[in-house]
Amino acid sequence: MNWTDRLGLEKDLSGASADAAGEHDSGAAAAHAAGEKFIKDEHDAARKQFEEDETAMVLLERCGRICCKEDGKTFYATVAARKWSWSKGLALGCSPEKSPECKDDDKEIGWWHTHPGRTRVETEGRTNEEKKKVLRIFEGGPFNQMDKNFVDGMISPNTGKHLPRRHNPDGKPLAMTRVFEGKVITVYYLNGEIKTHEPNVE
């Protein structure tokens, strides 16, 4: 299938800021900036909690809408409230459709969310004198079937066809930001295709 560049993915995004409330020159930059900011916030909060009581914090997904102003050139992201659950020790996923609407007559062009990874407290050292607790933060996973279902709708086991998109009726693209091999990257899914945007790369 052909990729539709609704997020302005092919633009030069080297100047993308990490301020989710800021304005950007493409939807891709706005999505990446929001994702990068909230992954950093989650990781920083986890490190702070570990310093205080040596426990591992549950990292939560963050998400929202990608909006385009009336000028067609300025983009920004909205952010859903941070919610969590201790059910089975896992965090709840984030619901982009529950984030604030785009302002006034601005146009919603897509969605963004994060895969912040997970944390674990481990003990290092071979002897009792050497043993110490350390916090491990693991990289977030790749785009999964649930993410694709958000864009495409569920697949019917009887017909193999996509069922109606409950949350994303217009089939807007979905961005996902995570840490991969030590770098924060954002990927975009639309029309069965995934593309990766890595900012500040020559």
Image (cartoon, helix red, strand yellow):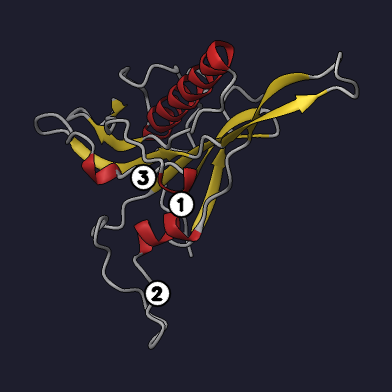
Residue 193 vertical position relative to residue 40 in the rendered view, above or below: below
Numbered circle sitting on residue 189: 1
Find residue 78 and report its image quarter: top left
Callout 3: few (<14), some (14-19), or many (20+) C-alpha neighbours within 10 Å? some
Instruction: State if disc 2 and disc 1 touch (CB < 8 Å).
Output: no
The residue that disc 3 covers is: 6
Question: Which amino acid lies under the numbered mark 3 shown in the image of this protein?
Answer: Arg
Instruction: Choose mark 3 or mark 1, whichever is in front.
Output: 1
Q: Residue at x 30, y 73 (%)?
A: 163
Residue 33 badge: none
The spot of residue 196 in percent (x, y) is 56, 42
Rendered location of residue 158, percent (x, y): 38, 88
Amino acid under disc 1 = Tyr
Q: Is residue 103 left or right of residue 110?
A: left
Measuring 17% from the left and 30% from the top, which residue is drawn there?
70
Q: Is residue 132 left or right of residue 118?
A: right
Q: How far apart in space, not on screen, are marks 3 and 1 (Cα)?
A: 11 Å
Report the side of 135 relative to 100 (left or right): right
Dot 1 or dot 2: first in sequence order is 2
Residue drawn at (25%, 33%), measured in percent from left and top? Answer: 68
In the displayed structure, 193 sits above or below 131; it is below
- Among numbered discs 3 and 1, the one appearing first in the sequence: 3
Q: Is residue 3 left or right of residue 47?
A: left
- Other-residue count near label 1 (Cα within 10 Å), few / some / many at <14 / 14–19 / ≥20: many
- Nearer to us of marks 1 and 2 is 2
20 and 16: which one is in front? 20
Q: Quote the CA–CA distance across marks 1 and 2.
A: 16 Å
Camera-side residue of 192 and 70 = 192
Q: Which circle's residue, 2 or 3, is located before the other in the chain?
A: 3
Q: Residue at x 40, y 32 (%)?
A: 31
Which residue does the numbered mark 2 point to in the structure image?
155
